[in-house]
Amino acid sequence: METVIINEKKIPWLIVERGFKIPSFNFESELTEVAGREGATLKDRNLKHYEFDLPLIALNDYIYKRKDHDEILNELVKFFNYEEPVKLQLSTKNWYWKAMFDGPIELESVREGFISFTIKVILLDPYKYEAKEYTSPAYSDQIAIKNDGNAKTYPVVKATALKDSTSFTITKNDEDYFMIGQEDALKEVKDKSPLVYGTFMNNVAGWSYLPNGEVMQDNITSAFAVGSIRSTGDNVTVKDYGERPTAGWHGPAVKRSLPRLVQDFEVTGVIKIFTRRQGVGKGFYHLYDEMGNIVCSFGLLDATNSTTNVKAYFSMHNEYQERFEWYANAGNWAYDNAYVYLKVKRVGNTWHLKTWHYYTDEDGKKRITSRASKTFNDSGNWYTAKIAQVGLHASKHTRYEALPVYFNRFHFYELLQGDGIPYIIKKGDEVYIDMQQELVLINNEDALHEKTFGSDYFSVDGGVSELFVLPQGTFDTKVSWINRFY
């Protein structure tokens, strides 16, 4: 018996009725007839979407435990009710569709044995996808792809930099190419964004605690400093929140000195607040000047205690420690239970902020959400102090339970001016290119602005294709793809 599988799940008593004809190759040609001319001319030819009824049978007997009408219907609704396309696979096939489902589901009121009905299937994407993904590594910067499908497919490129590079290029059969960055033998290469300090939070070495009882200057990003932190190996989180003698926020706060003063900079921090309906929490990164005053704070907070409501928050402080609230937004729950990337950049008196989050979908492909960006021109030069120290803190409130806060990574770069081609990719950076989504990431950050004019995303036809990676000897690269069929 052939069953239906949706996102790797199935109902054992639900089978496909015999005689179902699988629709394929849904091409449609648009023709034009010209008076006085024999035959017709081809105006257009397209692969159309599908809409068809899938005939199913619900087995309602003693083997599968008899159920009444409502029990069967409720299970079917849970099985088919999705707001976006999902994997639909027939158990005897090694491929799947990306399908949506419409009703109505019409079942006989009371019936034992075989209950026949149909569900409407909508395929906005008219292709079949093989259930297996293929991966091929690069050998001497050359990659062979063998597409066994009868339709073109789109590769996903993943590359780790073995050394700094001004560009990344991948070509196909000397026909198409995709490139980010630039190359120019007549220009000097210069590292315009040297790393000043970076950590993936795999330890807490080098951080110094603020004195117990110290209260940071800002009432939103501040807390009563007390307690301690620890590393899980992947994140830094709170070990002990300590105690506060009065009502308010309290928790561990640490900072460390940079090896030099920095004027223009770019800093990226990643934070997650594990949210639930009860509890509050804050997690912030801080940038300090030579006097130990906070120049900029950015992070996440949830202070509601009644619903999940994580906000991304950015603020700046002048020499008198007066606070300017730059950005405070929950983004329609965009930051709940997510590792959120928070980026701040200052060049001269212009500030830029950016937030984003990435996740991996059912197909194993990366998606970017929770995007926000904002620019501020500090025309009064209030927030121009050089950065001497960086810090972080997490806190809870005395009246409420604590929400866990996780610090995942922090990288602080100095931005230098001058001529020369900059390194856009540093040793250890990860480049990710999804040709179908037209998505390019460097370290999980959207890097579309680095795409070279004239290059483009490309597909791979049936058969064997040769891909080449440039510059040679610079990247450890592999390419993944899924065979597609009409």
Image (tube, rainbow, N blue to C red):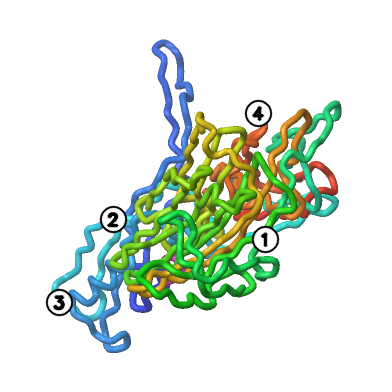
Q: What is the crowding at mark 4: few (fewer than 14 residues within 10 Å), some, or many (at least 20)?
A: few
Specify few, some or many for label 3: CA neighbours under 10 Å numbering under 14, 14-19, or 20 or more.
Answer: few
Q: Which residue is mark 4?
A: 453
* Distance Cα–Cα, label 3 vs label 1: 64 Å
Q: Residues within 10 Å of mark 2 (few under 14, many from 20)?
A: some
Residue 229: percent from the left, percent from the top?
57, 73
Earlier in the chain: of badge 2 and badge 1, it is 2
Instruction: Name the residue nearer the viewer: 323 or 76.
Output: 323
**Residue 445 within the magenta-colored segment of the rendering:** no
Task: State which region is magenta.
Answer: 5-9
Check residue 199 in the rendering and tell me which mark sits there, or answer none: 1
Q: Which mark is residue 102?
A: 2
- The image shows residue 93 at horizontal and vertical percentages of 51, 65
Q: CA distance from mark 1 to mark 4?
A: 34 Å
**Label at residue 110:** 3
Q: Where 328 sits versus 203, above or below?
A: above
Q: Label 2, label 4: how many angstroms apart (C-alpha)? A: 42 Å
Residue at the location (50% across, 52% down)? Answer: 298
Badge 3 amino acid: Val
Element marked by disc 3: loop
Q: CA distance from mark 2 to mark 1?
A: 49 Å
- Assign a secondary structure to mark 1: strand
The residue shown at (44%, 43%) is 324
What's the residue type where badge 2 is placed?
Asp
Disc 4 from disc 3: Cα separation:
65 Å
- Callout in the foreground (4, 3): 4
Between discs 3 and 1, the one toward the N terminus: 3
Q: CA distance from mark 2 to mark 3?
A: 23 Å
The residue nearer to you, when weighing 377 against 189, is: 377
Q: Amino acid under label 4?
A: Phe
Q: Is residue 8 magenta?
A: yes
Q: Could one spot residue 92 in this view of the protein?
A: no
